[in-house]
Image (cartoon, rainbow, N blue to C red):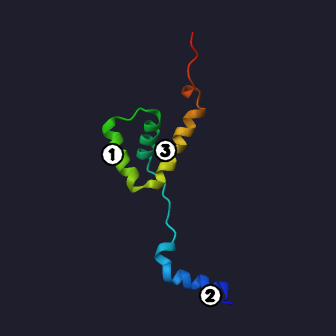
Amino acid sequence: MPNTFEILTGFLDRYEADVEGRELREPPDEIRVQLRALARGDLARTEQDDLMAILGQHPDWIARLADEVKALRGAPEAAPRPRV
């Protein structure tokens, strides 16, 4: 039975570029502000289109948008106002 480490080493030698990790960068402050505005529905249509193109280039930032939406669910201003 071959040594497990030999198998792993051979795999990494063969597929190193595909297995190599990538750094996940946080979006710049400007993009974070736009993500927050998009989550709140306050981002202009033209800015939405630009932001979607940026998110297409940085799909890991979509998780930040999801965090903004989740944060709004718990925020008091996001709750429906009582009828008077």
Distance in Å between CA atoms under marks 3 and 2: 42 Å
Q: Residue at x 51, y 47 (%)?
A: 64
Q: Secondary structure at mark 2?
A: helix
Q: Residue furthest left?
A: 46
User: Is 5 situated above or below 64?
Assistant: below
The N terminus lies in which quarter of the figure? bottom right
Question: Does 47 sit left or right of 39 as displayed?
Answer: left
Q: Quadrant of residue 43?
A: top left
Residue 57 appears at what percent x and percent y? 38, 56
Distance in Å between CA atoms under marks 3 and 1: 15 Å
Of callouts 1 and 2, the N-terminal one: 2
User: Is 68 situated above or below 7?
Assistant: above
Tell me the kind of residue under disc 1. Asp
Q: Residue furthest bottom?
A: 1
Which numbered circle lies on residue 75?
Answer: none
Of callouts 3 and 1, the N-terminal one: 1
User: Is 67 situated above or below 72?
Assistant: below
Q: Residue at x 56, y 19 (%)?
A: 81
Q: Residue at x 44, y 42 (%)?
A: 35
- What is the crowding at mark 3: few (fewer than 14 residues within 10 Å), some, or many (at least 20)? some
Question: Does 78 sit left or right of 58 as displayed?
Answer: right
**Which residue is labeled 1 in the image?**
50
Which numbered circle lies on residue 65?
Answer: 3
Q: Name the residue nearer the viewer: 38 or 11.
A: 11
The C terminus lies in which quarter of the figure? top right
Which numbered circle lies on residue 6?
Answer: 2
Q: Name the residue nearer the viewer: 29 or 74.
A: 74
Residue 28 appears at what percent x and percent y? 43, 50
Q: Secondary structure at mark 1?
A: helix
Q: Residue at x 36, y 40 (%)?
A: 48
- What is the crowding at mark 1: few (fewer than 14 residues within 10 Å), some, or many (at least 20)? few
